[in-house]
Amino acid sequence: MDRLYLYDTTLRDGQQTQGVQFSASEKTEIAQMLDALGIDYIEGGWPGANPTDSEFFDNPPATRATLTAFGMTKRAGRSAGNDEVLAAVLNAGTGSVCLVGKTHDFHVREALGISLDENVENIRASLAHLKAQGREAIFDAEHFFDGWKANRDYALQCLLAARDAGARWIVLCDTNGGTLPHEIGAITEAVIAAGIPGDWLGIHTHDDTGNAVAGSLAAIRAGARQVQGTLNGLGERCGNANLTTLIATLALKEEFAPLVPQISKAALTSLLKTSRRLDEILNRQPAPGAPYVGPSAFAHKAGLHASAIVKNPATYEHVPPEAVGNARIIPMSNQAGQSNLRARLQDAGLVVPEGADLAAILTDIKIREDQGYAYDGAQASFELLARKHLGQLPKFFVVERYRVIVERRRNAMGQQISVSEAVVVVEMDGQRVMSVSESHGESDADDRGPVNALWRALAKDLGPFQAAIDDMRLVDFRVRITNGGTDAVTRVTIDSEDRDGHRWSTVGVSPNIVDASFEALQDAVVWKLIRDGARP
Amino acid sequence: MDRLYLYDTTLRDGQQTQGVQFSASEKTEIAQMLDALGIDYIEGGWPGANPTDSEFFDNPPATRATLTAFGMTKRAGRSAGNDEVLAAVLNAGTGSVCLVGKTHDFHVREALGISLDENVENIRASLAHLKAQGREAIFDAEHFFDGWKANRDYALQCLLAARDAGARWIVLCDTNGGTLPHEIGAITEAVIAAGIPGDWLGIHTHDDTGNAVAGSLAAIRAGARQVQGTLNGLGERCGNANLTTLIATLALKEEFAPLVPQISKAALTSLLKTSRRLDEILNRQPAPGAPYVGPSAFAHKAGLHASAIVKNPATYEHVPPEAVGNARIIPMSNQAGQSNLRARLQDAGLVVPEGADLAAILTDIKIREDQGYAYDGAQASFELLARKHLGQLPKFFVVERYRVIVERRRNAMGQQISVSEAVVVVEMDGQRVMSVSESHGESDADDRGPVNALWRALAKDLGPFQAAIDDMRLVDFRVRITNGGTDAVTRVTIDSEDRDGHRWSTVGVSPNIVDASFEALQDAVVWKLIRDGARP
């Protein structure tokens, strides 16, 4: 069957993005998301190049996708078996190994400083070594397109060396991102004509001219049957081909859909969630206009468009937003806003009485978002706000005051230690309850800081509500400085989880990070009490 | 001369971006920037559609570029001269007028609800009316590519009606962004073959599949000689073709450069500044990986790349960053190699002695990044770390202990207020100095939280170093939870600025957010003291 293999390099090339540094556990989580999407190859990193990549390959996640280790062809002057960099890559024990090697004569001379023949031999011997070790061998032909333009015979000689050494895939890389799509298409065709079948060829592009996706599609149309990219287009400089975009286009456009049976309709609807989770891991705001998954990707602002959309969504949408888990937004239409809000409230299990003043809720949300709140990522706080307007917010307790102290000093042994102490005073059912919590220890790791101390003080003694509280914990905490009106304020979003793994998110905003955190903590507790059916 | 006309619609289609609303004076400033770049047409908005656009056209800026008013073809059942919407557009008095009209039979029936012939007559009469009024007439053929695929004869009939009525330009619009570049190229060729010369044809694409730039280039290669787009790719949904990207590609790629003599080398170097100024107007962060102008567009993080770049920048750059006013960055991280490190240290003005143990610095960076540090966004902390290894880190002061208290309670008037108090004890030149700072007030806005309180206590009395400290302030603060080894830790990055606007970034990591912040604060101060040439 003619089919296209999807090769993800978020964990390797994506990690080359400025400011991006995955931990090993984040790598594992991302690999699992990629696997759920239906990706064929997951390039996990370069074993031996840094501690994180090594740690990841020491305990690789179980995936249906083929986990692939990345490295480079052996260096000159030693055998493939005696190259310790290559040995570290092979030691990761993956079934598939991808080695990058040079194919541009200029680079062989300038960057490696070896002869053209030595380089060809390095490619041949390295790929043959992979094959001899029983691995699926992949060759990333670095700077191939520039190499082809400069010295076609030599570039091709490098590919043929890899092919003859037993490479399963030969990946044409536009490493500096400067080759335009029509060139990529034409050169890929020429390579196929020169004797490397399309179903041995992969394409790897970068977005330095904003054409990485188009270049990939051009190579696929020319016959290449592996495409490399990264989630959300992460990667060195301007990023790699955006696999999030490519997956949607390949699966939804008639011309390409038969090539990607591995992307199921159901998996495709998780595309937005996957993209957003990666942004969360990176603490990045989603790109508003990202194709398919951007928060604005299906926002119809122009009056002419919005009115036509109401008649028939196909008028201004090339694909239905639901196909990728996204939703249509009509920002200027108050009517659409209200019906949208009603649907969301009903989804949350709220009773919305006839004649409820939904416009007042929308106005309040707009005012609060202007102050720095963001309800998109904090559904639980949004629900509490709506409940307040609808008169459906129970008053379980009132926080009268709190105080938190963080002290850093030397202990008796002269070591620097930190201590956090929190006091929370709550009024509940006419009674004042004062709780204190302290964290300290012989090492820094025993102290989790002021927010944790406040949480433990708040959760310590909530009387009749204690059972509900004991069943929850804080799992994530995100902080962003944003503009509230004219001043910078701190927005804190907290994710909480119960023992069954249900998660909910709450938000707090204040110039003071502790106050913002406490607001989000309180919302988290109140939302849990309501969900558990507690009564004041 | 065969030449390509650049048509900017930032002020019209760009204003359809969710969350974007220009004022009339912002429109004027943007028009002036576009004019300085060498754009041929500036579409200023839709006169009569909203007060801002009308205000802009009432006092249009003087530009070398042709200012263009946008509107739609006349409605059915009235003459072009009696359509008040069209009259408002003409009243703006621009030399050039662009009218959008339908060319997709489905839209004529679904959205307009008129007959196919009526629509053709609306196009003809409207364009003829522009011509009769002595204006340059431009026809935006809405949904043209979908229309062509659905009913080729009808779509073409609409274009020919515009041509025969005297339109100077007929612009093929991929309004919903769903047509792929190879289709755009092929259909543009077919239109030219059907009798509309390429130098009457324009192309207008949207980025819903991430191919707006590629689609534009495909149409230009097919012969179209006007290209429409927006600065930074603003626009409805996923945005329009990014003109910032297109200008650079057209001017810098050999194949296209002869087509755009209006973009001078000098104007091209202002591309980055223009892009950033638009972000400032919109209060948006620049997209890190935007082609050519992104802050990371020329950031070489991979060790292999960075070492080659040092030898010859052309190895990993398809164009020189200076050509668009950008600059090369070699960030430090655990991906980096020794040559990368040496280049960075020299850039920072450090003396790197022969035989310095650069490997030890890299190892330390790798260990610390594993603990949660990230140095590629915190150059100043990286420099301090390197100085420590090289024995070039002066000891200005030692922080013996600190304590911060945040208290939220009611004041005498019963209002909730927050108070933050910090104490810092520093040893300096054999002396202990204890400083305290307090923030509180009648309103929340008077309290900036514990980090600010600590900063003020630390900065209060640093004796001989006070002048250097008084000349700096904290301008941004970023927090993320990350994994340090097996535990979650908090990473805080702080940006500081001096009075001359120089910025530097520092990082701190700890399970306790206050400790992490304090570490970054301390680095910020020490880096400033070194830069100012202070001596302990």
Image (cartoon, coloured by chain):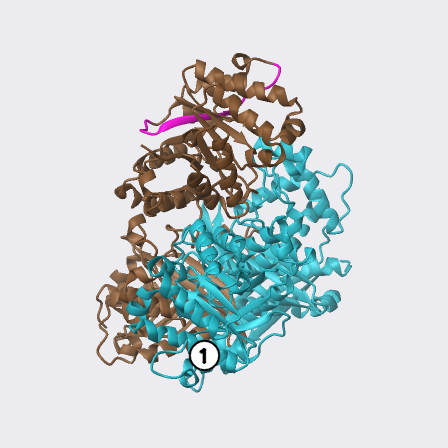
Chain colours: A cyan, B brown
Q: Residues within 10 Å of mark 1 (few under 14, many from 20)?
A: many
User: In x, y percent, where is residue A478?
Assistant: 54, 61
Image quadrant of residue A527? bottom right
Task: Tell me which amino acid carries mark 1.
Answer: Gly
Q: Nearer the viewer, residue A365 or A469?
A: A365
Q: Secondary structure at mark 1?
A: loop
- Residue at 49% over, 36% down: B188
Q: Is residue B66 magenta?
A: yes
Can residue B403 be seen from the camera position used here?
A: no
Quarter holding the N terminus of chain B is top left
Say which chain tag 1 marks: A
Q: Nearer the viewer, residue B26 or A114?
A: A114
Quarter holding the C terminus of chain B is bottom left
- Residue at 31% over, 64% down: A106
Image position of A143 with respect to B154: above or below: below
Q: Nearer the viewer, residue B355 or B128?
A: B128
Range of the magenta residues? B62-77
Image position of A44 with respect to B24: above or below: below
Q: Is residue B121 left or right of residue B331?
A: right
Q: Is residue A6 magenta?
A: no
- The residue that label 1 is drawn on is A48
